[in-house]
């Protein structure tokens, strides 16, 4: 052991004892600092803390016990090991010394070899403790850096996934914007026509006919059309035959307008209007009024769709830096991701959702968003845009504790058995160079482990399932 770096403070009111101890310790090249009373010892230790203090008990003005008590109360000196050296040999004296924080007790008269052995032992222990503290500090700093790096990797993966989604998201926003723009134009045109036709129409209708007209209009407003193209064609054909039977002119065009307005069943209450000489003006005026409502509904639907996409995007891009778990709905997070992938899914993928009732759980929802998006993105890629994606939820167990389970299954080409055990390794990827970092599933694994959850995969050609289980934790302050 390299002793030249160790400084030892000796405190004893007897000069002979100071000289004896100083001589013994100097033989080992320790840096010895002798003082003769407690007050000087405290000043010396505070000004330049030694590596070890050898302290006599019986001293005038301030006993060794009092000195030790003040040393341990001072943040600057509390960690310095103290060895008591005293002629007092009673057990209670030794117990008192150790209770005050001393590391050893040597009784006088002492042997030089014993003193050196004990000093060397406690200096070695002190040195090891300091080394351990430094290592712990280094480990703490390393862990902080690793945590920061992990958070950066999650964010980078989020941004990379977002890059793949941008085109689809732009489409998801542009489509409702286009619908809104078209609907506004239709409303404006229909309003202008209605303003011109309504005064003219009411001049032609009797009071009784006006009542019937408003009933006709109300039925159209209460029955928004929700027919497929095939169903609409069939309804127009059947209605035309009915109108022909009542000898109503322009039956084909009239049937088309009525079906578009949602009036194609039981038209008997309105036969009087349809057989009136002004039937074309009556139906056209009602049609333009209904068009305004239908287009208003289109705008509301488009705004809702765009808002849903923006909300999902905002939810995905958000990152909670508080580091605290919060109670969240797992299905809500999955639905937000599916909203972002709506454009890719609707082109050729059948989406089956098998949701069962599961409780909210304490989790890091922003991180789980990354799990859902990575697994779903891989599933879409594995199916090459065509196939079936199934997302199921349920209740499971992790080490006999209740958990929620999410199973994501795709009908893609599968994961070869030879590499299934490696897919969660960092930097492992089967994607072409430049298309993947190999960190996606590694990050997924880390996030699941951070939740004390489990993830496993089963795969064969045509069916790959990622099964994720997350524990249902009790809320803080609650038991069970």
Image: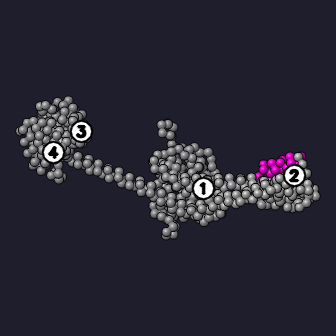
Q: Which residue has dot 1 on it?
A: 309
- Look at the numbered discs 3 and 4 and tell me whether their residues touch, using CB distance below 8 Å: no
Q: Nearer the viewer, mark 2 or mark 1?
A: 2
Residues at circles 1 and 3 in contact by the CB criterion of under 8 Å: no
Image height of 232 relative to 113, above or below:
below
Dot in front, 4 or 2: 2
Indicate the secondary structure of the residue bearing disc 3: loop
What is the x, y in percent for residue 426? 45, 61
> Contact, CB < 8 Å: mark 1 with mark 4?
no
Q: Is residue 357 above or below residue 151?
A: above
> How far apart, in angstroms, are the residues tagged by discs 3 and 4?
18 Å
Mark 2 neighbour density, 10 Å: few (under 14) some (14–19) many (20 or more): few
Residue, disc 4 = 8
Badge 4 marks a residue whose secondary structure is strand
Q: Which residue is at 57% across, 47% downward?
A: 329
- What is the spatial separation of the Cα atoms under label 2 and label 3, in whole angstroms? 102 Å
Give the residue pinned by disc 2: 203
Of marks 1 and 3, which one's residue comes earlier in the chain? 3
Q: For the residues marked 1 and 3, what is the alpha-carbon distance in whole angstroms?
A: 60 Å
- Say whether disc 2 or disc 1 marks the residue closer to the N-terminus: 2
Residue at label 3?
A: 74
Number of the label disc, if any, that sits on residue 351: none
**Colouring used for the render:** one colour
Gap between marks 2 and 1 measured at Cα: 48 Å
N-terminal of the two: label 1 or label 4?
A: 4
Q: Residue at x 10, y 38 (%)?
A: 36
């Amino acid at each position: 052991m390299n002793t030249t770096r160790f400084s030892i403070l000796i405190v004893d009111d007897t000069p002979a004892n100071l000289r004896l101890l100083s001589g013994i310790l100097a033989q080992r090249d320790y840096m010895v600092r002798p003082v003769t009373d407690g007050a000087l010892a405290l000043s010396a230790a505070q000004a330049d803390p030694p590596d070890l203090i050898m302290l006599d008990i019986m001293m005038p003005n301030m006993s060794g016990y009092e000195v030790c008590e003040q040393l341990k109360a001072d943040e600057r000196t509390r960690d310095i090991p103290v060895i008591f050296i005293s002629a007092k040999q009673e057990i209670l004296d030794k117990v008192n010394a150790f209770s005050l924080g001393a590391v050893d007790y040597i009784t006088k008269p002492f042997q030089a070899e014993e003193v050196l052995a004990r000093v060397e032992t406690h200096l070695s222990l002190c040195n090891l403790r300091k080394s351990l503290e430094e290592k712990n500090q280094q480990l703490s700093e390393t862990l902080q850096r690793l945590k920061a790096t992990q958070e950066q990797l999650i964010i980078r993966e989020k941004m990379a996934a977002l890059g793949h989604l941008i085109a689809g998201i732009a489409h998801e926003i542009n489509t409702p914007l286009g619908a809104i723009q078209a609907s506004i134009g239709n409303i404006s045109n229909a309003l202008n026509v209605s303003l011109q036709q309504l005064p003219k129409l009411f001049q032609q209708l009797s009071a009784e006919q006006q009542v019937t007209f408003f009933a006709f209009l109300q039925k159209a407003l209460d029955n928004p059309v929700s027919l497929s193209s095939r169903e609409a064609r069939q309804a127009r054909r059947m209605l035309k035959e009915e109108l022909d039977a009542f000898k109503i002119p322009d039956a084909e065009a009239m049937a088309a307008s009525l079906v578009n307005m949602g009036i194609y069943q039981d038209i008997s209450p309105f036969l009087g209007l349809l057989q009136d000489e002004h039937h074309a003006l009556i139906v056209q005026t009602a049609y333009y009024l209904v068009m305004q409502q239908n287009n208003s509904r289109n705008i509301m639907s488009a705004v809702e769709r765009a808002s849903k996409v923006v909300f999902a995007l905002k939810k995905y891009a958000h990152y909670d830096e508080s580091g605290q778990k919060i109670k969240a709905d797992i299905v809500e997070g999955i639905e937000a991701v599916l909203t972002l992938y709506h454009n890719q899914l609707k082109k050729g993928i059948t989406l089956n959702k098998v949701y069962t009732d599961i409780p909210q759980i304490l989790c890091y929802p922003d991180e789980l968003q990354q799990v859902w998006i990575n697994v779903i993105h891989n599933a879409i890629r594995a199916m090459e845009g065509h196939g079936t994606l199934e997302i199921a939820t349920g209740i499971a167990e992790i080490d006999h504790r209740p958990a929620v389970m999410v199973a994501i299954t795709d009908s893609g080409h599968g994961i070869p058995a030879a590499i299934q055990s490696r897919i969660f390794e960092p930097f492992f990827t089967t994607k072409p160079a430049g298309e993947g970092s190999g960190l996606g599933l590694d990050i997924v694994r880390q996030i699941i482990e951070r939740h004390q959850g489990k993830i496993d995969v089963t795969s064969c050609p045509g069916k790959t399932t990622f099964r994720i289980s997350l524990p249902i934790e009790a809320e803080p302050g609650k038991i069970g």
